[in-house]
Amino acid sequence: MTSESLQRFLDGSLGGHVPITVTPMTGGGSCEVFAIDRGDARWVLRRSPRHASSATAHDVLREYRILDAIKDEPVRIARPIVAHADADVFGAPFYVMERIAGTAIVQHVPAAWATMPHTHGRALEELVDALAAIHAVDWRACGLGDMAPRPDYLGRQLKRWLSQLDSYGGRDLPAAHHIGEWLAAHRPADQPSALCHGDYKLDNVLFAPQAPPQLLAVVDWEMAAIGDPLIDLAWALIFHPGPEGTMRLGISKPPSFAVEHVPDRATLVERYRAASGRDTSSIGWYDVLSRWKLAIVLEGSYAKFQRGLSDKPMHERFGAQADLLLDSATALVATASRDGATS
């Protein structure tokens, strides 16, 4: 279960004998990631954590299956190469995909963008355009029909996440329960299902380092599913770099977004509507849902930290971030209740 066994596997799967180098990388979400150089090929290997549960191991193979199904669709992804379901080759199930020479936006934007601040809005436009293309995939024709969601998708989402919150045994968060009640009472009709990324935002896409902004690939598909596409859209808007964003990306360190040149939330929603043909009139409800759901996700890690079960320093900050998101969702609910609308 070394690079030598991986060498033999790749030679056997792809043909020929081409020496490889294997270098650990940072990032990758819940997966371990490695850079693989094989001749002129530049790849990334995503491996399940070696002590992961069988469910987590399955997620890696599920991610590969989705990417393999859509690799010939007009979507921006790192093309998958090969997968292996057992631990005998590299210690855990894994898959290999092409390596994209791009940059994710977290604290700042690529240095070259600083010379063309008037083009920064293109990054958000590219983000929306790439998402609309994902949601346009005919997932049934791609062989993903068995992943179709059961009826009452949104209702089941609300029950699932409230149950998840209650399972933590952590802080009492009455705001989360009040928001959950509002969401249930104002739930819109389910959207036609689409292939959804599940964690779509500026730091899960790769941009070319040059200016003007060009989105090269959408990465980290471990949460992908067939579901309601407006959840993806609203989730992405949480991280808008302008003042409408709740957890703003690309502005904490220089060079940062020139926010005066970035389209606002309403403009981006309209761009998505025009590109997708979908009804976005209830996007305000999804804005509340996305903040509420992300708060619950972060609260789970914060609860683990409080119990001494997490050694990641960032998890200590997740409690304050969850509070921020719940405050934002509460303010949106108050505005919607006052205006009698959820758009």
Image (cartoon, helix red, strand yellow):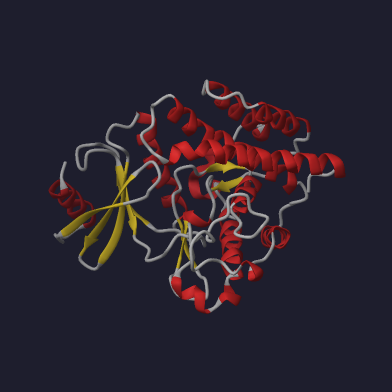
* Residue 341: x %, y % from top left: 83, 44
* Residue 164: x %, y % from top left: 55, 26
Residue at position x 60%, y 76% in the image: 118
Name the foreground residue: 313 vs 120: 313
Name the foreground residue: 17 vs 42: 42
In the rendered image, is residue 56 in sight?
A: yes
* Residue 41: x %, y % from top left: 26, 65
In the rendered image of this protein, does residue 19 appear above or below residue 169?
A: below
Toward which corner of the image does residue 292 lie, by quadrant? top right
* Residue 38: x %, y % from top left: 21, 62
- 162 relative to 25 in the view: left or right: right
**Count of marks, rendered view:** 0
Name the foreground residue: 32 vs 65: 32
The single residue placed furthest to the bottom in the displayed view is 115
In the rendered image of this protein, does residue 278 appear above or below residue 291?
A: below
In the rendered image of this protein, does residue 115 appear above or below residue 201?
A: below
Toward which corner of the image does residue 48 lie, by quadrant? top left
Task: For the N terminus, give its image quadrant.
Answer: top left
Toward which corner of the image does residue 163 lie, by quadrant? top right
In the rendered image, is residue 191 in sight?
A: no
- 244 relative to 18 in the view: left or right: right
Residue at position x 35%, y 29% in the image: 53
Residue at position x 16%, y 61% in the image: 18
